[in-house]
Image (cartoon, rainbow, N blue to C red):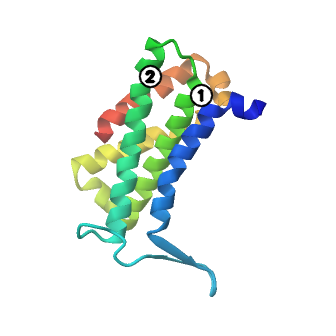
Amino acid sequence: MPFIKKNYGWIIVTILAIIPMFILSTMFKIDTSNGFVFTLVENGGKEGMSTLEMLYHITGEFSIRWMTSVLTCTPFFILFGIHNLFVRQAMGIATAIWSLLHFVIFIWAEGFSETFTQFNYIAGFIAVLILIPLLFTSSRKWMKKLKRTWKKLQSLAYLAIILSL
């Protein structure tokens, strides 16, 4: 029970971040009867979208939702005197994972060279590049190691949201 009491924020954020994965899991199937075969379900999308386009759309939507929620919860935490940095940390990790998943699906759907064809694709690519070091330095160990520099580095998340939007 002490573990749950201490880490309830992480647990809630993790559950909320994983739930949409169940929706995505209905759009592909894995066959291990003759090796490892990963295929997309036919007509898994809606409104005339292919399954791959639907995966691309859903992951992008959730990455923006997580990014917006983590950045908008900060003023509420300050306003109400909540000092639970680790809930925001878990939300930031969920943001980075959803963004990386979105980028991987984008490359799968469009190809890496397509990243540099439009301004919004380039901005999204830069946002993902910003989120990668934020993801790797979001542990307590890195907080102690980087000290004040850690906060400056994590403030790049604001630039990532602007680029993403």
In the rendered view, does 159 fall on the left or right side of 7? left
Residue 32, x across and y down, in percent: 63, 81
- Asked if residue 131 can be seen in this view, the reply is yes
- Asked if residue 110 can be seen in this view, the reply is no
In what quadrant of the picture does the N terminus appear?
top right
Q: In the structure shown, which secondary structural element does the residue marked by tag 2 occupy?
A: helix
- Place residue 109 in its image quadrant: bottom left
- In the image, residue 56 above or below residue 64: below
In the rendered view, does 133 fall on the left or right side of 75? right
| Label 1 Cα crowd, 10 Å radius (few <14 / some 14-19 / many 20+) | some
* Residue closest to the eye, 29 or 132: 29
Marked residue nearer the N-terminal end (1 or 2):
2
In what quadrant of the picture does the C terminus appear?
top left
In the rendered view, does 136 fall on the left or right side of 39? right
Determine the residue located farthest toward the front in the rendered image.
1
- Which residue is at 32% across, 41% downward? 164
Determine the residue located farthest toward the right in the rendered image.
2
- Place residue 45 in its image quadrant: bottom left
| Label 2 Cα crowd, 10 Å radius (few <14 / some 14-19 / many 20+) | some
Q: Which mark is residue 108?
A: none
The kind of residue tagged 2 is Thr
Residue 74, x across and y down, in percent: 44, 22
- Which residue is at 44% across, 31% downward? 70
- In the image, residue 135 above or below residue 156: below
Q: In the structure shown, which secondary structural element does the residue marked by tag 1 occupy?
A: helix
Residue 39, x across and y down, in percent: 47, 77
- Which residue is at 36% across, 59% downward? 56
- Residue position for label 2: 74
- Residue position for label 1: 86
